Image (cartoon, helix red, strand yellow):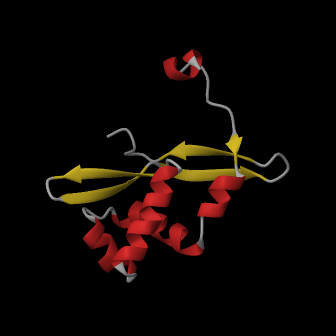
Amino acid sequence: MRAVARGDRQPGALPAAPLLAALSREALDLLGVILRDRPTSVSELVALSGRAQPNVSRSLQSLAGHGLVRLVRQGREIRPQAMVSVLRVDLATGTYEVTPAPDAAA
């Protein structure tokens, strides 16, 4: 764990089943919109996605729970930020690894 924190090695693969259960088509579409369009608020994401606000909020909470997005409070608004840009699933082992999004550290 300390070696990962220092950057000496990459974290190991994580169990994929819980994550895959959360990745509906709608959730994947939202991730794509967040990565491509970088909405400045959930309201903007709702407009860009064409989905109802409660559905978007529910999907964002699930994605945030799995570490795929971060919900950043900016005043009265919440900005969704993608934390990963690539997700690799190894079906043989049932594990996954992620590549951080370019602006995930910001």
Residue 64 in the image: state x and y as whole percent.
Answer: 45, 53
> Is residue 93 shown left or right of residue 80?
right
Most foreground residue, 78 or 99: 78
Can residue 68 be seen? no
Residue 40 falls left or right of residue 34: left
Residue 32 seen by the camera: yes
Q: Position of residue 46 (x, y in %)?
A: 33, 76
Q: Residue at x 23, y 51 (%)?
A: 73
Residue name at image x 45 percent, y 48 percent: 83
Q: Position of residue 27 (x, y in %)?
A: 52, 68
Give me the residue at 67% from left, 51% from top.
88
Picture coordinates of residue 26 (x, y %)? 52, 74
Residue at the left extreme?
75
On-image quarter of the N terminus: top right
Q: Say left or right for 16 vs 63.
A: right
Quadrant including the C terminus = top left
- Corner quadrant of residue 98: top right
Looking at the image, residue 4 lies above or below residue 41: above
